[in-house]
Image: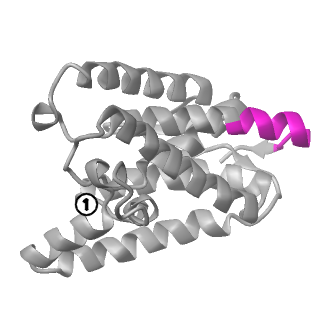
Amino acid sequence: MLFPIGDDQVKGGYYPLFSYLFIALNTAIFIYQVMLPGPELETFVFDYGSVPSEVVQGQQLYSLLTSMFLHGGWMHLLGNMLFLWVFADNIEATIGSGRFLLFYFLGGVIAQAVHIYFNPGSILPTVGASGSISAVMGAYLVMFPSSRIKVLFFFFVFRIPALLFLGVWIWQQWLDGTASLAVSTAESSGVAYWAHIGGFVFGVLAGLFILKNNHIQPLISEP
């Protein structure tokens, strides 16, 4: 598997305050999670994770936001924070912290709404920042298509175009998402592929809107 570890950076722009703050906040909350005893951890996840069957009944709507800051394990957290660290700072540096904050939360809520649409009866709590991060990646695709992503493959490090890296990523999500429709919730992998797809599509549309209405031409430099 290819792991992104860097990219071409925006010259100047706004300081990516929330991009780094979200990494710190997600990490702190996860550390709190793992310190909870088993029964308390389960209660915590069900209280603050987004359970589709409850949300469609208008219950625990706050979980659409709180679930973005919970994670299911160390690998889930590290993977999400790595993608957030690589892709989010360029977006925030270009559009500003206030608009990035709105974009991030809106992307996360829309991503979960898409997941809930395809899994309205699920009683499994959905957790993770993946929906918001997928939105960031979608915006990155249209705003920085020629940027080069620095990737790690075993012990090899090389750069590939953002268009290729993100194009392959969303294609894989689409394949897994459509395949997941053929299996029951109990048989599924537990990965919210449709949240990834929904967030990514939102990010693409938001990125196009930003470019069209703000005439942004971000400058980038080598990492």
Give the SS element for disc 1: helix
Q: Is residue 22 left or right of residue 68?
A: right
Residue 208 is one of the magenta-drawn residues = yes
Vertical relation: 135 (above or below) 37: above
Residue at 53% in and 29% down: 166
Colour style of the rendered protein structure:
one colour
Amino acid carrying mark 1 in the image: Trp
Task: Using the image as rendered, state which of residue 21 and residue 160 is in the foreground.
Answer: 21
- The magenta region covers 206-219
Vertical relation: 46 (above or below) 195: below
Prevailing SS of the magenta stretch:
helix
- What residue does disc 1 label? 74
Question: Visible in this render: residue 156?
Answer: no
Residue at 25% in and 60% down: 74
Residue at 21% in and 41% down: 190
Q: Residue 100 at what x, y percent from top left?
A: 69, 57
Residue at 71% in and 37% down: 207
